Image (cartoon, rainbow, N blue to C red):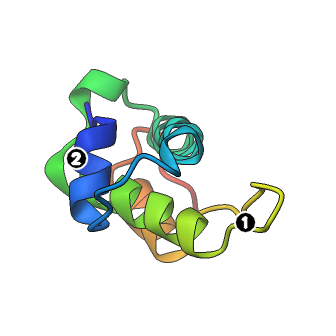
Amino acid sequence: MLTLSEIKDALYIDFPDHDEFLLRALSAAIGRATSITGLSEECLPKDIKSAIIQDVATMFTNRTDNGESMLGSRASIYTYRRHSVNPMF
């Protein structure tokens, strides 16, 4: 699956200041993706991984001073739903 290093590369972050936040955001985004798609973390296709990166980027951009953040982007939900084993109507 995605690693902290891959997330930092995608977001052009080369310092460790936000590693803890990024790890929490990555975990939340992966949980969201697996919950919506019904797929296991090991079986996520490439476009789902891109949507996870997008979610983490959105959370990072919208973080607050106390380290909280909004949920990921709405655009990623469409990608997750397209791969859902239990389609939502």
Q: Is 20 or 44 nearer to us in this picture? A: 20
Residue picked out by circle 1: 70
Residue at label 2? Answer: 6
Q: Residues within 10 Å of mark 1 (few under 14, many from 20)?
A: some
Question: Is residue 65 placed above or below 24 in the rendered structure?
Answer: below
Q: Between marks 1 and 2, how big is the CA–CA gap? A: 21 Å
Quarter of the picture containing the N terminus is top left
- Amino acid at dot 1: Met
- Which is nearer the N-term, disc 1 or disc 2? 2
Residue 86 in the figure: left or right of residue 7: right
Where does residue 76 sit, x and y in percent of width and height? 44, 67
**Is residue 81 placed above or below 26 in the rendered structure?**
below
Do the CB atoms of the residues marked 1 and 2 lie less than 8 Å apart? no
Q: Nearer the viewer, residue 74 or 58?
A: 58
56 relative to 3, above or below: below
Tell me the residue at 36%/54% (across/down).
15
Of tags 1 and 2, the one toward the viewer is 2
Horizontal side, residue 40 vs residue 33: left or right = left
- Residue 14: image quadrant is bottom left
> Of residues 53 and 40, which is closer to you in this image?
53
Residue 46: percent from the left, percent from the top? 16, 50
Number of marks drawn:
2
Q: Secondary structure at mark 1?
A: loop
Q: Position of residue 33 (x, y in %)?
A: 47, 44
- Say whether residue 66 is left or right of residue 63: right
Please state which amino acid type lies under the numbered disc 2.
Glu
| Image height of 28 relative to 7, above or below | above
